[in-house]
Image (spheres, helix red, strand yellow):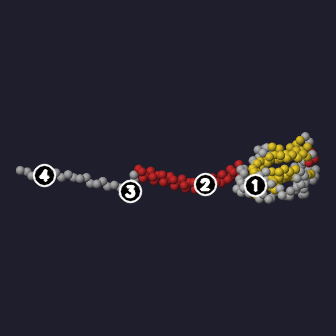
């Protein structure tokens, strides 16, 4: 009689897994983290360049920037044609007037005004135009496109020998409301010989436009 032999079943040896094992979820989280940090690094490098470009674009747009509401703010609008002179202006609370002078225009100081008109506080546009009316001249100041001040001068006022000066504030600026705001200063040249002209050293005919507080 034979003794039955026991069947010995061999158990498979455990599979050796790699020491570092990543699931799909872990891989996706790592990919997202790498993407976020890459974007942060790129943005830190690009933001200063974009800020410089935005600053340059603001200069081209010539926007009126009012940081202190207690001060005057002004910027000259972009010229759309030759001798186009228009400004965006903000005046704080108070009494102001705009003055136009066409005689005795000095290189630095103000001049006796030919005409003046009151200006209310707030934001508005102011422009000036020098036009030929037949043989004579007409100087017009417009507020928000509407005629505000008009001064007429004879043909001899501007003999056509050239001029110096023009509009100011091509970039937005703010200043104390107690000081005069000179927007436009132009002085006409006078002949010094048969072939040359120059701007006089003293006051002469021209155009001077400014805003000042009413005291």
Image quadrant in which you'd find residue 137: top right
SS of the residue under disc 3: loop
In the image, what residue occupies the spot 9% across and 52% down?
3
In the image, what residue occupies the spot 93% across and 52% down?
193
Residue denoted by label 1: 92
Tell me how far mark 3 sits from mark 1, CA to CA. 70 Å
Camera-side residue: 52 or 179? Answer: 179
Residue denoted by label 4: 5
Q: Is tag 2's residue or tag 1's residue first in the polypeptide sequence?
A: 2
Camera-side residue: 98 or 24? Answer: 98
Q: Nearer the viewer, mark 2 or mark 1?
A: 1
SS of the residue under disc 2: helix
Asked whether residue 79 appears in the rendered view, the answer is yes
Asked whether residue 182 appears in the rendered view, the answer is no
Residue denoted by label 2: 47
Tell me how far mark 3 sits from mark 4, CA to CA. 44 Å
* Coordinates of residue 171 in the picture (x, y in percent): 74, 53
Q: Is tag 3's residue or tag 4's residue first in the polypeptide sequence?
A: 4
Do the residues bearing badges 4 and 1 touch, measured as CB atoms within 8 Å? Answer: no
């Amino acid at each position: 009689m034979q003794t039955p032999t026991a069947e010995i079943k061999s158990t498979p040896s455990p599979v050796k897994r790699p020491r570092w094992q990543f699931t799909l979820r872990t891989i996706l989280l790592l990919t997202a983290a790498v993407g976020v940090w890459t974007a942060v690094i790129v943005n830190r490098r690009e933001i200063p360049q974009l800020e410089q470009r935005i600053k340059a674009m603001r200069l081209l747009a010539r926007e009126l920037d009012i940081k202190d509401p207690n001060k005057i703010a002004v910027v000259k609008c972009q010229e759309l044609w030759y001798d186009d002179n228009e400004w965006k202006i903000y005046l704080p609370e108070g009494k102001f007037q705009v003055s136009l002078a066409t005689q005795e225009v000095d290189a630095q100081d103000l001049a006796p005004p030919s005409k003046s008109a009151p200006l209310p506080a707030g934001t508005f546009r102011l422009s000036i135009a020098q036009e030929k009316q037949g043989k004579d001249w007409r100087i017009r100041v417009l507020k928000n496109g509407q005629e505000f001040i008009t001064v007429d001068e004879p043909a001899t006022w501007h003999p056509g020998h050239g001029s110096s000066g023009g509009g100011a504030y091509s970039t937005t600026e703010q200043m104390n409301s107690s000081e005069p705001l000179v927007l436009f200063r132009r002085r006409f040249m006078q002949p010094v010989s048969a072939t040359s002209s120059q701007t006089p050293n003293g006051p002469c005919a021209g155009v001077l436009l400014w805003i000042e507080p009413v005291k």
